[in-house]
Amino acid sequence: MPTITVDGRSVDVEHGSKLVLAIEALGIDIGHRCGGKARCTTCRVDVVAGEPETFTRAEYRKLREAGLLDEARLSCQLLVEHDMTVKVLKTLQSEGWADTGPAVAPELTPEPQRFGRDALEAETPLG
Ligand code: FES
């Protein structure tokens, strides 16, 4: 089972678990204000080690739109398939929200295909 580590706390998770849910399982109130649909970016994390090389198209487009490419990844779009160390960037406490957001489904939404960054940049070249 892969291990995720956040702020020095670690947990073993089932292979293929959605990262945002694994972070919540550590008791961290990470944001997911759109319910895990790659629309809000509040689930953003800094992947310190073990960053996946592929993106869902939805994650890539949202990161690019928000100016967050190379800054963060969306934990609602990442599956834990190997050990990862991440830093959570927005929490209930840091943002002062009343709640972290709607429940996140365990499966990827809106689409499960994942692509390398080169393939996605070729679709819509950076200006
Ligand atoms: S982008 Fe909204 S929860 Fe991930």
Image: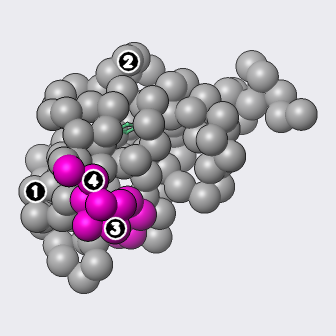
Q: Quadrant of residue 33?
A: top left
At horizontal 12% and vertical 64% (from top left) the residue drawn is: 26
What stretch of residues is rendered in magenta? 83-98
Residue situated in front as seen by the camera: 54 or 35: 35
SS at badge 1: helix
The chosen color scheme is: one colour
- In the rendered image, which quarter contains the C terminus? top right
User: How far is mark 3 from mark 2, CA to CA?
Assistant: 27 Å
Is the residue under label 4 in contact with that under label 1 (CB below 8 Å)?
no
Observer-nearest of 10 and 14: 10
Dot label at residue 25: 1
* Beta carbon at label 4 within 8 Å of ligand 1: no
Please give the label number shown on residue 110.
2
- Viewer-side residue, 70 vs 52: 70
User: Height in image: 1 above or below 107?
Assistant: below
> Residue at (54%, 25%) from the top-left corner?
57
Residue 74: x, y in percent? Answer: 43, 45
Disc nearest the viewer among 1 and 4: 4
According to the picture, the residue beneath numbered tag 3 turns out to be 94
Circle 4 sits on which residue? 97
Left or right of 55: which side holds 66? right
Amino acid type at image mark 4: Trp
Which amino acid, mark 2? Answer: Pro
Name, please, the residue furthest toward the bottom: 8
Real-space Cα separation, disc 1 to disc 2, in angstroms = 23 Å
Check disc 1 and give the amino acid type.
Ala
Q: Are marks 1 and 2 in contact (CB under 8 Å)?
A: no
